[in-house]
Amino acid sequence: MSSTFAPSLACLYVDNFERLVVLHDDNPYRDQIKLWKRYIDDVLMVWNGSKEEALAFAGWLSGANPFLTFTMTIGGNELPFLDLLIHEHEGGLTTEVYYKATDRNNLIQYQSFHPRALKDNLPVGQFLRLRRNCSSEADYRKHADKLATKLQTKNYPTHLVNKVRKRACNNRDQLLQPRADKPDLEKIVCVTTFSPLSNKIQKIIKDDWKILTSGAY
């Protein structure tokens, strides 16, 4: 998936396969699928049947399309899906953040030449992700401690890490709410390659916007 359009193309292809094969009435296993949720090519399924039947279903899926191969992980009391670890708990489900065994601390160094705003906002996204993914306060604190250590090894200022961590402690229900759609305003986008002079270019455009839009140039 080296091309930017590849995920969209994959979604369209697999969506067509779902409608024509997986969720079609001709699927002999259709009645045993109680839940089917997909993100690009990863699927979370709730199955009403035996383990042997589930494995047979995976084999049937792989044989239904020569360009798709399906593998299946059958969980016990917990199951990883994307960056979530889903637990069965007292008749319900709880979640926490999930890291693959191959995960490495690949956060950028704070001394890098990336824009300052990018570096300052990186911990914000990381801590908010933890708060959304962890349904338990205890799980959030556990993973937040690990993340704070990772950031400190990359030389992020302690005061910045603590400030962002405190911000992420907001009500989780609010963080799970979808963002309100912004009004669809006509915008003119100026795209340039990154340069140390980007801020100066932005300032020139803002300062001289009236001149640029008047046609007097």
Image (cartoon, rainbow, N blue to C red):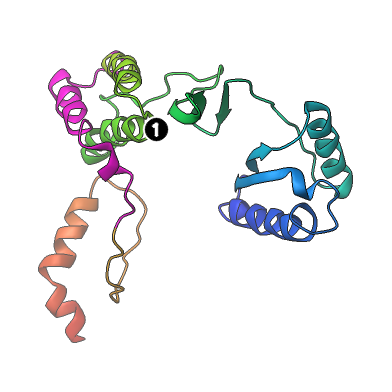
| Residue 200, above or below 140 | below
Question: Can residue 217 be seen?
Answer: no
Q: Is residue 24 left or right of residue 83?
A: right
What is the three-letter code of the residue carrying label 1?
Asn
SS for tag 1? Answer: helix
Q: Is residue 93 left or right of residue 168?
A: right
* Residue interval drawn in magenta: 153-179
Residue 202 position in % (x across, y down): 20, 59
**Which residue is drawn at the image coordinates 82% and 44% (left, top)?**
61
Q: Nearer the viewer, residue 143 or 147?
A: 143
Residue, far bottom? 215
Residue 87 position in % (x across, y down): 51, 24
| Residue 203, above or below 134 | below
| Residue 207, above or below 83 | below
Q: Quadrant of the C terminus?
A: bottom left
| Residue 110, above or below 195 | above
Q: Which residue is mark 1?
A: 133
Residue 5 position in % (x across, y down): 59, 56
